[in-house]
């Protein structure tokens, strides 16, 4: 589970021993366990499950905390690579129904790294300007530059989810998007972006409890949107739309990961591991100096 970056390559931290113990609670790599499988039916998913993970909540939260050092160091290496001519970036695509915890992932997982290296974008109902362009226009404009960890809270996938369920485009139009999306993602992957697609799957019961909480707590009213009930009424249609999106757009360069999200701590743990995996896959060291270090040291000394 230590990935391609052997530990000696990274600074040792006090968390190392805790980490070695906790990562044993995964009985298989999260990227394998959570990856969409062709025979999978999302209607049968146990949204309250913790596939591949033998630990409890406390273990999960401690592992996320212990991963922070490696996550932020690899993100800094990525940033340094981008600053010195590298072309690589990571794009985390977060999809999920209302209350599935997309915002919590941003706060608790993406929040572990330096915000200067993060390019976050949430996609809502297209503005008039966005609607005047093709649906990939606003997406392309928001892609992470080299060196960045891009995060999409909702994405181009809305074009085969809400657009399908609400009938915002004729079927032949939204159906064409699957192939368009695959071609688009292949293009950005070839240009150096590691795409991490995550669907946070909340159950119908848990969604109700979370919506109720938003209505019972004044500090959560701001998260509630009366329109969420209309979306909830189409829960089954959304599952159908997710199922087909997974079937049609889970590719080798950009596979889907289906993450049970009734346990927020598990979803956060899973996404931490998936993002870490993407960063490790670059196998980045620190960029060499683009100047003569000895000479610069000498010149610095001469400045008195
Ligand atoms: P929220 O994420 O709670 O701020 O809600 C954003 C809303 O924007 C959701 O209801 C989405 O379904 C909606 N939305 C996002 N992208 C699109 C799109 N391409 N077309 C229509 N609605 C969209
Ligand atoms: Mg909402």
Image (tube, rainbow, N blue to C red):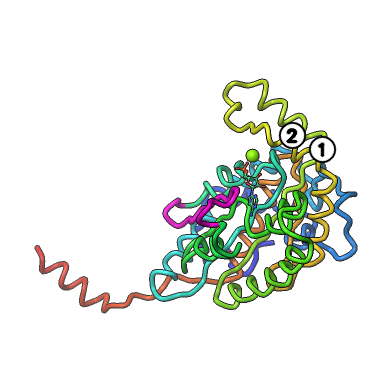
Would you place residue 274 above or below residue 110 in this image? Answer: below
Instruction: Indicate the position of residue 218 as horizontal and vertical percent values.
Output: 59, 21
Residue at image x 45%, y 57%? Answer: 117
Examine the rendering and report whether any part of residue 59 can be seen.
no
Q: How far apart are labels 2 and 1 at the CA level?
A: 12 Å
Mark carried by residue 160: none
CB-based contact (under 8 Å), mark 2 and mark 1: no
In percent of the image, x 54 and y 60: which residue is there?
132
Place residue 291 in its image quadrant. Answer: bottom left
Image x and y of residue 72, in percent: 50, 55
The residue wearing badge 2 is: 229
| Closer to us: 65 or 158 | 158
User: From the image, which quarter does the N terminus lie in?
Assistant: bottom right
Looking at the picture, does residue 222 appear above or below residue 20?
A: above
Does residue 133 appear left or right of residue 234 in this picture?
A: left
Q: Position of residue 241 (x, y in %)?
A: 80, 55
Which of the pair 20/300 is nearer the observer?
Answer: 300
Label 2 vs label 1, nearer the camera: 2
Q: Residue at x 42, y 67 (%)?
A: 80
Q: First in sequence: mark 2 or mark 1?
A: 1
Q: Find disc 1 in the rendering and name its residue.
A: 204
- In the picture shown, does residue 204 fall above or below 83? above
Verify whether residue 269 appears in magenta: no
Under circle 1, the secondary element is helix
| Image quarter (top left, top right, bottom left or bottom right) of the C terminus | bottom left
Question: The magenta stretch spans which residues?
Answer: 114-130
């Amino acid at each position: 589970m230590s990935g391609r970056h052997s530990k000696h390559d990274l600074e040792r931290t006090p968390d190392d021993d805790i980490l070695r113990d906790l990562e044993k609670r995964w009985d298989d790599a999260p990227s394998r366990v959570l990856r969409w499988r062709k025979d999978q039916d999302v209607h049968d998913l146990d949204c309250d499950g913790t596939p591949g993970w033998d630990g409890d909540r406390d273990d999960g939260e401690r592992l996320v905390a212990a991963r922070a050092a490696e996550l932020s160091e690899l993100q800094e290496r990525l940033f340094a690579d981008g600053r010195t001519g590298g072309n690589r970036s990571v794009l985390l695509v977060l999809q999920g129904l209302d209350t599935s915890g997309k915002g919590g992932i941003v706060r608790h997982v993406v929040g572990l790294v330096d915000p200067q290296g993060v390019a976050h974008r949430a996609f809502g109902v297209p503005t008039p300007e966005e609607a005047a362009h093709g649906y990939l226009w606003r997406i392309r404009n928001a892609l992470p530059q080299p060196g960045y960890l891009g995060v999409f809270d909702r994405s181009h996938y809305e074009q085969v989810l809400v657009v399908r369920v609400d009938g915002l485009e004729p079927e032949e139009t939204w159906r064409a998007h699957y192939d368009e999306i695959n071609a688009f993602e292949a293009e950005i992957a070839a240009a150096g972006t590691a795409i991490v697609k995550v669907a946070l799957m909340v159950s119908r019961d848990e969604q109700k409890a979370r919506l109720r909480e938003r209505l019972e707590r004044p500090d959560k009213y701001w998260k509630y949107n009366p329109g969420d009930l209309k979306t909830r009424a189409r829960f089954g249609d959304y599952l159908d739309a997710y199922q087909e999106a997974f079937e049609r757009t889970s590719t080798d360069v950009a596979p889907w990961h289906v993450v049970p999200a009734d346990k927020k701590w598990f979803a956060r743990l899973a996404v931490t591991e998936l993002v870490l995996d993407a960063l490790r896959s670059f196998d980045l060291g620190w960029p060499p100096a683009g100047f003569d270090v000895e000479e610069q040291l000498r010149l610095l000394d001469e400045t008195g």
